[in-house]
Image (cartoon, rainbow, N blue to C red):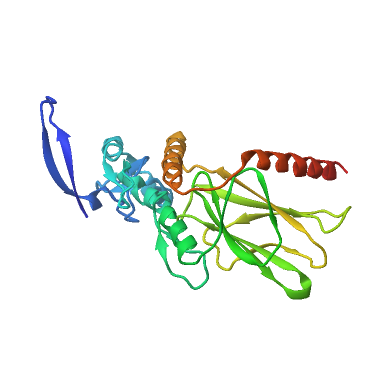
Amino acid sequence: MEAKSDIINKEGEGKQNVTMRMDVFNCSICSKPLGPPIFQCSKGNSICSACCEQLPESKRAAVHRCYIMERVVDNMFVSCKHGCGRKMTYYRQDTHERECPIGPCMCPVSGCGFVAPAVVLLDHLTTLHKLPTTQVELFMMFHLPVQAGSQVLCSRNGRLFLLEMASLGSFGHAVFLVCVRPETPRATVDAFVEFSCFEGHFHASKLKIIPDGEPRQCLCVVPAGREISVHIGISIWMEYLDNDELQEEEEKEMDELDDAFQEFDYDFDQDEEDDAVQEYGSDFDEEEDD
């Protein structure tokens, strides 16, 4: 892999184009891009911290920190291949492209191999698969009737979920949830589901959702026999890999993705949502106190 860069000369009066092989900035042992802290052995080879820790004690004594290489890699920026317009350091390129908000997502419908960015995938689900769409707010409870079928849940910050309710005959309905997102997201997704079969009965469960889940994850089984309302709450929190810089990137990316999703027209009544959350939320709190 080669890259061109503009380098300012010592006087800062101009720039010159430089072409270099990027593998020069990879670890001599594992061949992964080098990122701070970087170490150098007695033979001049650059080594990442993970490989350095695995060296025998006899060889580790001859290794020292290579600050000049750290300065170089911290000032080498590359563009995202997905075309999101963001630039990142070379050693963070692979991580970003796997997590890019416009990176490829796999269609969650069984047997469909379509892959596209989340915004395009939403159109694919609603037009080709003709699935209904419901807009939801993360961290808040929303309420759906129990009936066989599938629908797309879309949050305001661009997260997509496929909710499926499968009939089990006399046993009731199984509720499945699939999270649609890039390969290695920065967020962990938890799903919370609750329902009541009759007065005095209450069931609640919580499950960690894996990306593009295969096989599908069953949130719960709602027994048959009476009219039941299923109330599903989805919460998302972020687990950042390095530092606050990643958090700032995530917030900016979600803002950009949110703007893209505004092109779709959703019918969403926030007042009704707040009323429902207040009603069911207070009931749940009372049940927990008991």
User: Residue visible at 12% across and 30% down?
Assistant: 9
Q: Position of residue 248 (x, y in %)?
A: 44, 35
Q: Nearer the viewer, residue 119 or 26?
A: 119
Q: Nearer the viewer, residue 186 or 65?
A: 186
Against 165, residue 286 (above or below) is above
Q: Position of residue 141 (x, y in %)?
A: 68, 46
User: Which image quadrant for residue 104?
Assistant: bottom left
- Quadrant the C terminus occupies: top right
- Quadrant the N terminus occupies: bottom left
- Left/right placement of residue 153 relative to residue 241 reads right
Against 94, residue 224 (above or below) is below
Q: Position of residue 188 (x, y in %)?
A: 56, 49
- Left/right placement of residue 281 relative to residue 69 reads right
User: Residue visible at 53% across and 58% down?
Assistant: 211
Q: Position of residue 31 (x, y in %)?
A: 31, 55
- Left/right placement of residue 54 relative to residue 193 reads left
User: Residue visible at 26% across and 38% down?
Assistant: 72
